[in-house]
Amino acid sequence: MARAIQVYTTDYCGYCKRAMALLAKKGVAFDEVDATTLREWLVDATGRRTVPQIFVDGVPIGGHDDLVALERSGQLDRILAGELAPPSIRPDGAPAPPPPSAPR
Ligand SMILES: N[C@@H](CCC(=O)N[C@@H](CS)C(=O)NCC(=O)O)C(=O)O
């Protein structure tokens, strides 16, 4: 089954564009999510204060540099193909809290 991938981004973010370009090159579908109003949750979920932050099946795998490192190590294709579990960047390895529901 295809992985569910979200890329949390903001406007004018070159690292976000580069991360999404790499995923697009891989031919995988992903959702770009505007992180502007989600920053508090995103820091809580990832421990990071920068964008992009990329989630694979709900697991935070990091930003642009982490994605490139996974690509260079040969793991990215296997993660995207579902052969390898996405590696969490959370120091405690605990599941990330789910994103807050969209404002009504
Ligand atoms: N090493 C990070 C760098 C990401 C980064 O510096 N992103 C900028 C935007 S392009 C950022 O989040 N700056 C802080 C902010 O916008 O609050 C990565 O590879 O994702």
Image (tube, rainbow, N blue to C red):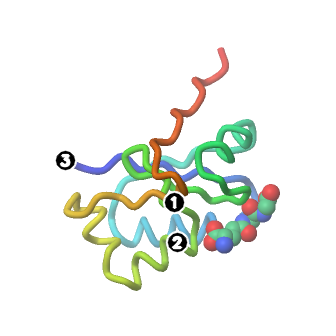
64 with respect to 104 (left or right) = left
Q: Which residue is mark 2?
A: 66
Q: Are marks 1 and 2 in contact (CB under 8 Å)?
A: yes
Taking the spot 74% from the left edge, 55% from the top edge, the residue there is 11
Q: Is residue 67 above or below residue 81?
A: below
- Indicate the secondary structure of the residue bearing disc 2: helix
Q: Residues within 10 Å of mark 1 (few under 14, many from 20)?
A: some
Residue 37 point in image, percent of width and height: 74, 36
Residue 38 point in image, percent of width and height: 69, 38
Q: Are marks 3 and 1 in contact (CB under 8 Å)?
A: no
Residue 1 - label: 3
Can the viewer see residue 90? yes
- In which image quadrant can residue 26 be found? bottom left
Q: Is residue 53 above or below residue 19?
A: above
Q: Nearer the viewer, residue 69 or 95?
A: 95
Q: Residues within 10 Å of mark 2 (few under 14, many from 20)?
A: some
- Indicate the secondary structure of the residue bearing disc 3: loop
